[in-house]
Image (cartoon, rainbow, N blue to C red):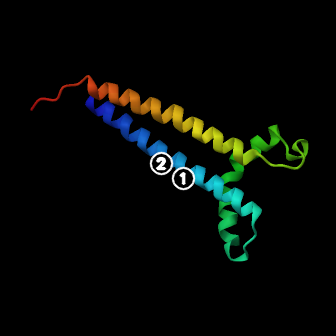
Amino acid sequence: MILLGNTLAALARILHIVLTIYLWIIILRAVFSWVYVPSLYQAGRVLYRLTEPVLRPVRRLLPPAKLGGLDISSIIVALLIVFLDSLLVNSLALYAHRLLRGVEVSF
């Protein structure tokens, strides 16, 4: 049980880091869409390629044309990431903690 508990705890940490990094990528993509800086054009293209597969389905459900031209797909995806982080990471960490708490280690 120790191995499973530690594996789940490590998985929760890794998942939290990945979701946090992707959240920042979404935020940077939104900022880059507001401001055009020619020297950061290549970085903007990379951010576009990383985020567009996730933002496109949200944009199909809520097209900017129906919202007065306002694209809120970044906000919705950011909220979904925060929700998944809270739900999955906390659940995995709690389950790992319960597995590890119930095991006594003796040498």
Q: Quick one: quadrant of the N terminus?
A: top left
Task: Name the residue tied to disc 1.
Answer: 21
In percent of width and height, residue 63 lies at 85, 43
Indicate the quadrant where residue 42 lies. Answer: bottom right
Q: Quick one: quadrant of the C terminus?
A: top left
Disc 1, disc 2: CB below 8 Å?
A: yes
In percent of width and height, residue 49 lies at 68, 57
Q: Amino acid at mark 2?
A: Ile
Residue 83 in the figure: left or right of residue 16: right
In percent of width and height, residue 48 lies at 70, 58
Relative vertical location of residue 11 with respect to residue 51 in this rendering, above or below: above
Residue 6 in the figure: left or right of residue 75: left
Residue in the picture at 65% in, 59% down? 28
Indicate the quadrant where residue 3 lies. Answer: top left
Q: Amino acid at mark 1?
A: Ile
Relative vertical location of residue 14 with respect to residue 95 in this rendering, above or below: below
Report the Cα–Cα distance between label 1 and label 2. Answer: 6 Å
The dot on residue 17 is 2
Residue in the picture at 31% in, 36% down? 6
Residue occupying the far left of the picture = 107
In percent of width and height, residue 47 lies at 66, 60
Relative vertical location of residue 87 with respect to residue 53 in this rendering, above or below: above
Identify the secondary structure beneath mark 2: helix
Relative vertical location of residue 100 with respect to residue 80 in this rendering, above or below: above
Residue occupying the far bottom of the picture = 39
Residue 67 in the figure: left or right of residue 86: right
Residue in the picture at 16% in, 29% down? 105
Residue in the picture at 18% in, 25% down? 104
**Crowd rating for badge 2 (residues with CA inside 10 Å; few <14, some 14–19, many 20+):** some
**Crowd rating for badge 1 (residues with CA inside 10 Å; few <14, some 14–19, many 20+):** few
